[in-house]
Amino acid sequence: MAKVKPPVQKNETVTLRFEDLTHEGNGVGKVDGYPLFVPHGLPGEEAEVKVIKVKKNFGFGKLLNVKQESDDRVEPPCDVYYKCGGCQLQHMSYQMQLDMKQKQVKDNMKKIGHLEHVPVHPTIGMDDPWRYRNKVQIPVGQKEDGELKTGFYQKRSHNIIDMDTCLIQDEMNDRMVETVRRIASKLGISAYDEHTHRGTLRHIMVRTGQNTKDIMVVIVTKTKKLPHQDKLIDEIRDAFPNVKSIVHNVNSAKTNVILGKQTNVIYGDEYIYDTIGDIKFMISPLSFYQVNPTQTKALYDQALQYADLRGGETVIDAYCGIGTISLFLAQKAKKVYGVEIVPEAVTDAKKNARLNNMDNAEFYVGQAEELMPWWRNQGLRPDVIVVDPPRKGCDEELLKAMLDMEPERIVYVSCNPSTLARDLRVLEDGGYETQEVQPVDMFPQTSHVECCALIERVKK
């Protein structure tokens, strides 16, 4: 059988009409039925596109010129948007972003979970979808004149784009990074070079409490010694007297992992604090704490509503982290059992429970799929199980353990609609019914979407 040749060739310029969006936010247009995926193209637009990659069944293009613009096209406010890889959706109206995310969840529910009958509600968005991130980790490089530069990596590269501001970061994070870079540059501290594995300063990380305004600065170096440490501390404090914590992290490995294993507090406190709703959290340099507390509250309020707690329930939180969802649930439940594989997170969760005077939440180190069968054998029968797994979704063994425990309700919080749909199919086949799914826009201007799903046991 003769090979069917794609109707386009690499470097050819074609005129396309975009019909749809991919889950990453790329425009989809077709040439004689052959799809081309083009970043920054919007449905309804006609554009000139350069073909940059040709595969058997689809290709990739670069947007050259939009001949007919969509009403949803907006001018990105960020100067480096088209170079930087951090955001994908600044060129589309916020309403279109929310609609795209709802559609993404619906598509996954239909294609992967075969659950097209399940209601997927409109995405919960932000009143102001900018300046929401409370944590920045930014690489440091060196300019040709020896001055330091900071910025995110260019798309599909490790070239640092020199920038002073990021419009999805808390403004305080921007100002702190710029200040630390300027002081380090003045003191002659060199940037780390990942190619030669030489130099000192690798990353600057800043965490801010959105509601408390606490600030933590983490300086990551390749070297065990932080050059000019005392001078650096003094000058940071002169510029920002309210900084609560300055931390030195040592990462001497050849790796793209940001933080190393050795962390020393060189000024102030080991933790900063922030609140989500009525609950206060301690945040260390290594804590996993949601980067958008405003939308985290919206997501957790939804989880709490779905859990439908009346005060007498036993709840298991199967990926509890530092106890964020667990403590939300503990406000309404009789007892919450949190499980987490990272020991440091469990230590933080216990501290957070004490900080909020909550004695009805217990936290355990381990894998939920191993602990839950043991609890079941001890006679523990949860009314509700809450899961908030990583992007890869729930382990098969965990899904089985959940089904074996037969809770009335399962509340599934997800950062990946495709693994959510896959896992919901397993739960449905095990005697549960998905009632509804609520998408939440945790990361405006990017293609990511979080969801909360309510699953109930079918009454026999």
Image (cartoon, rainbow, N blue to C red):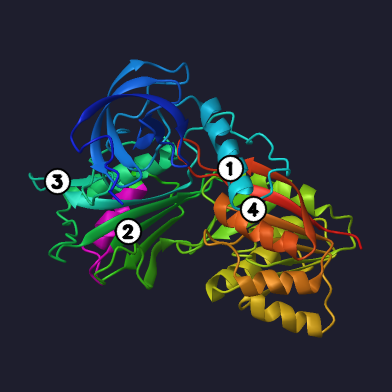
Residue 416 appears in the picture as rendered: no
Is label 4 in a helix, a strand or a loop? loop
Disc 1 marks a residue whose amino acid type is Asp
Q: Is residue 261 magenta?
A: no
Q: Nearer the viewer, mark 3 or mark 1?
A: 1
Q: Residue most toward the left? A: 145
Disc 3 marks a residue whose amino acid type is Glu
- Relative depth, front residue between 208 and 41: 41
**Residue 107, numbered label:** 1
Instruction: From the image, tell me which residue sits under label 4.
Output: 113
**Residue 219, numbered label:** 2
- What separation in Å lies between label 4 and label 2 (alpha carbons)? 44 Å
Mark sitting earlier along the chain (4/2) = 4
Label 1 environment density (alpha carbons within 10 Å; few <14, some 14–19, many ≥20): some
User: Percent position (x, y) of residue 447?
Assistant: 47, 41
397 with respect to 404 (left or right): left
**Residue 184, numbered label:** none
Is label 2 in a helix, a strand or a loop? strand
When the figure is inspected, residue 371 is found, relative to residue 323, above or below; the finding is: below
Mark sitting earlier along the chain (4/3) = 4
Label 3 environment density (alpha carbons within 10 Å; few <14, some 14–19, many ≥20): some
Q: Nearer the viewer, mark 1 or mark 2?
A: 1
**Residue 147, numbered label:** 3
| Segment tinted magenta in the rendering | 221-237
- What separation in Å lies between label 1 and label 4 (alpha carbons)? 9 Å
Mark sitting earlier along the chain (1/4) = 1
Q: Nearer the viewer, mark 4 or mark 2?
A: 4
Is label 1 in a helix, a strand or a loop? helix
- What separation in Å lies between label 4 and label 3 (alpha carbons)? 52 Å
